[in-house]
Image (cartoon, coloured by chain):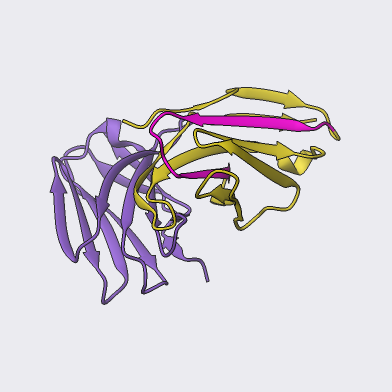
Chain colours: A yellow, B purple
C-alpha cells in the first residue's frame, strides 16, 4: 500500500505568516497532488507535479506555491497566509507520470487554521 | 460544468439494503474511474476502480461503468452501519484526478 505522510495533522498560523506543508510518499510515485477540502465544495486541486522540479497549476493555485526537489517530497507553501485559506489540506500520490494510472493514495490531511 | 458530478445526498438506507451511488462525467476521453470512501475527519481511501464498460465486483461492492452514457455507479450490497461515510467519485481525463463533491451515505441500523 502507498504510504503518504504529511508533516502536521493540525496547524494554527497567523494571518500573513509563511506556511509550509510537507508531504512524503514511499512508493516511488511520479505524480503528487495537493488538494484542499471544504464543506460543500469537495476536493479542489491546488497544484500537482508529475516529476521532480515539474509542477502544474490546478484549479485554485492563487496564494499558493509548491516545490518538488526530490521525487518523494512535495511541499505546499502559503506565501502569506490568509483566513480564507483555513481548510483541510490533503496530499496524494500515484504512479504513471504524464499518463496517470492507478488510484491515488492520500495522506492523513493537515487541518490548517489561519487566525 | 464540473468534470465529475455527484448527487450530494444525503442518502439513507436501512441496514441490509442496497445503496446506490451515482456519478456522471463530462470528458469522453476519461478512461479511468475511482470510488473513494471518506469517513468524517479522515482522508479518502480508495475502494474501487474501473476502466472497462460493464460491472466490476469486489466483495459487497460493485462498480458499474457506462461510457456511452458517461455514467459511473457504485452499489453496496448488504449495507452495514460501518458503510456510513461520504463516497467520492473521481476520473482521470488527463494526468490529474477530478473529484465529485461526494455523496453522504447513512446506513440506519
Expressed as whole percent of the image width and height from the top left, the position of residue B65 reads 23, 63
Magenta residue span: A17-38
Residue located at (42% from left, 51% from top): A97
Question: Which quadrant is the C terminus of chain B positioned in?
Answer: top left
Q: Is residue B2 one of those drawn in magenta?
A: no
Q: Can residue A86 be seen in this view?
A: no
Q: Can residue A14 be seen in this view?
A: yes
Coordinates of residue A92 in the picture (x, y in percent):
47, 40
Residue in the picture at 50% in, 37% down: A71
- Left or right? Give the position of B44 relative to A60: left
Quarter location, residue B20: bottom left
Q: Residue at x 37, y 72 (%)?
A: B29
Image coords of residue B51 (percent x, y):
24, 59
Residue at 59% x, 23% y is: A7
Which image quadrant for residue A19?
Answer: top right
Which quadrant of the view contains residue B64? bottom left
Quick one: B26 or B7, which is closer to the camera? Answer: B26
Main SS of the magenta part reads strand
Amino acid at each position: 500500500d502507498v504510504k503518504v505522510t504529511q508533516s502536521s495533522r493540525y496547524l494554527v498560523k497567523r494571518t500573513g505568516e509563511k506556511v509550509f506543508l510537507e508531504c512524503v510518499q514511499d512508493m516511488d510515485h511520479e505524480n503528487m497532488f495537493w488538494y484542499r477540502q471544504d464543506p460543500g465544495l469537495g476536493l479542489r486541486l491546488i497544484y500537482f507535479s508529475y516529476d521532480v522540479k515539474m509542477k502544474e497549476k490546478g484549479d485554485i493555485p492563487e496564494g499558493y506555491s509548491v516545490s518538488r526537489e526530490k521525487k518523494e517530497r512535495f511541499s505546499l507553501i502559503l506565501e502569506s497566509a490568509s483566513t480564507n485559506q483555513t481548510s483541510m489540506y490533503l496530499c496524494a500520490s500515484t504512479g504513471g507520470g504524464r499518463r496517470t494510472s492507478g488510484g491515488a493514495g492520500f495522506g492523513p490531511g493537515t487541518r490548517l487554521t489561519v487566525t | 460544468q464540473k468534470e465529475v458530478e455527484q448527487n450530494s445526498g444525503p442518502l439513507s438506507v436501512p441496514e441490509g439494503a442496497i445503496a446506490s451511488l451515482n456519478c456522471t462525467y463530462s470528458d469522453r476521453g476519461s478512461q479511468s474511474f475511482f470510488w473513494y470512501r471518506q469517513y468524517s475527519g479522515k482522508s479518502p481511501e480508495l475502494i474501487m476502480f474501473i476502466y472497462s464498460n460493464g460491472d466490476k465486483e469486489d466483495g459487497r461492492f460493485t462498480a458499474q461503468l457506462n461510457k456511452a452514457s458517461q455514467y459511473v455507479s457504485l452499489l453496496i450490497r448488504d449495507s452495514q452501519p460501518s458503510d456510513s461515510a461520504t463516497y467520492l467519485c473521481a476520473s482521470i481525463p488527463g494526468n490529474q484526478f477530478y473529484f465529485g463533491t461526494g455523496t453522504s451515505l447513512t446506513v440506519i441500523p
